[in-house]
Image (cartoon, rainbow, N blue to C red):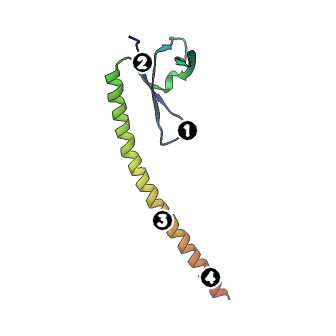
Amino acid sequence: MLRMYYVIQRHQGDPKKHYLAYTVPRYISSKNSQNVIFEFQVEGKIKRKWAPKTEIILLTDNRELFKTTLNRLETLKQTHLEKIDTAQTLLNNELSALLTSMQEEFENIKKSVE
């Protein structure tokens, strides 16, 4: 049976997507390198992906540890994304109210000058 390694890696860029989770059949690492090389099979050819060690949160062959960790991260992410969505809705409402108030004030200024 093919041994699989389970990886959780930090994701840079999108603030709502904090990590990537994937499996690899093989990886290469050394104490002297700042990177880990992951090997994948794509259409029968070996492809390599480099990742800085500082971005690797979890690298294990323990599937249960991987699933447990992933569930913890997903629960944490969902909790905060719900708060962010609520805050975004409130912010959008406040911005809309501000724009409406400013437009009304502009109209009042125009009327008082005429």
Q: Are marks 4 and 1 in contact (CB under 8 Å)?
A: no
Amino acid type of the residue that numbered disc 3 sits on in the rendered structure? Glu
On residue 80, the disc is: none
Query: Who is closer to the viewer here, 46 or 74?
Result: 46
The residue singled out by tag 4 in the image is 109
Give the quarter of the figure containing the N terminus. top left
Q: Earlier in the sequence, mark 3 or mark 1?
A: 1
Height in image: 15 above or below 38? below
On residue 94, the disc is: 3
- Judged from the image, the secondary structure of the residue bearing numbered disc 3 is helix
Q: Earlier in the sequence, mark 2 or mark 4?
A: 2
Q: Position of residue 95 (x, y in %)?
A: 52, 64
Q: Position of residue 94 (x, y in %)?
A: 48, 65
Q: Are marks 2 and 1 in contact (CB under 8 Å)?
A: no
The residue singled out by tag 1 in the image is 13
- Judged from the image, the secondary structure of the residue bearing numbered disc 1 is loop
- Judged from the image, the secondary structure of the residue bearing numbered disc 2 is strand
Question: Residue at coordinates 34% horizontally, 28% vertically from top-left?
Answer: 67
Amino acid type of the residue that numbered disc 4 sits on in the rendered structure? Ile
Q: Earlier in the sequence, mark 2 or mark 1?
A: 2
Question: Residue at coordinates 51% horizontally, 13% vertically from top-left?
Answer: 29
Question: Residue at coordinates 57% horizontally, 78% vertically from top-left?
Answer: 105
Work out how far the residue at label 4 is from the one at label 1, CA to CA, in angstroms: 44 Å
Q: Is residue 109 left or right of residue 6?
A: right
Q: Position of residue 98 (x, y in %)?
A: 52, 69
- Judged from the image, the secondary structure of the residue bearing numbered disc 4 is helix
